[in-house]
Image: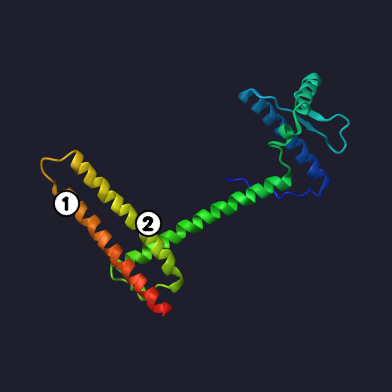
Amino acid sequence: MSRKNVKSSIIKDVTSRKASHKTRSLGLLKKTQEISVLCDVDACAIIYGEDDQVPLAWPSSEAEVRRIINNYKGKSQVGQLERQLDQQTFLKQTVQKSEEKLARIQVKNRELQMENIITDIMAGRSTLEQVPFCDLGYMIRMLKERMKLVKNRISNWGNNINSNPPFQNSSASRDDNLKINSSLFHGDGMMEAITSRNNHTSE
């Protein structure tokens, strides 16, 4: 069962807030100890409660806590702030990463949409006239990239044949070559059709 997202706001009920403070404080101290022991790094956590006279802290040794804090203070200001995050900065970074991920997904979806349109046109299930004019430029760029990849494959295939000539061409190799050339032919034809439509529309 997945955990629910916790709303980042103060718990208004005092009893619930104190119970949450106790539970989460112990959990934070445990995590601090774990990361220090498992990763062999200095880590320190100091937590003040509303009515606590003595704060909760890890390490439990006051001398060790002071050593870690003094070590931190001894660093330059740049070193102190290098990976320091407040809630606002953390949220900004999270939003930025989400936006970048969304942009990548949108680009991928756009490419898949264009691939489906091109496939339908080549299969006769659709026509070029049904493609919105605003999509033609993107389709041209996409076709150019695909044709470049196909030409590179043909070139590499030819180089491999020349460097390692087989005793006899297999039927599978001939079929693959025919498929590649057919794909390239259709790509050229579609490029010409799109360019012609663009010119006609511009006029």
Q: Helix, strand or loop at disc 1? A: helix
In the image, what residue occupies the spot 45% across and 61% down? 110
Give the image location of residue 100, x and y in percent: 56, 52
Q: Can I make out residue 152 in this image?
A: yes
Up the image or down, 195 lies above or below 33; here it is below
Pointer 2 residue: 145
Specify the color scheme. Answer: rainbow
Give the image location of residue 76, x and y in percent: 75, 30
Identify the amino acid type marked 1.
Answer: Arg
Up the image or down, 61 lies above or below 108; here it is above
Q: In the shown orientation, is residue 105 left or right of residue 45?
A: left
Give the image location of residue 20, x and y in percent: 76, 41
In the image, what residue occupies the spot 23% across and 57% down? 181
Image quadrant holding the N terminus, namely top right
Q: In the shown orientation, is residue 136 left or right of residue 95?
A: left
Pointer 1 residue: 174
Q: In the shown orientation, is residue 21 left or right of residue 123?
A: right
Mark whose residue sits in front, 2 or 1: 2
- Count of numbered badges drawn on the protein: 2
Mark 2 or mark 1: which comes first in sequence? 2
Give the image location of residue 87, x and y in percent: 73, 45
In the image, what residue occupies the spot 36% across and 70% down? 195
In the image, what residue occupies the spot 83% across and 34% down? 48
Q: Helix, strand or loop at disc 2? A: helix
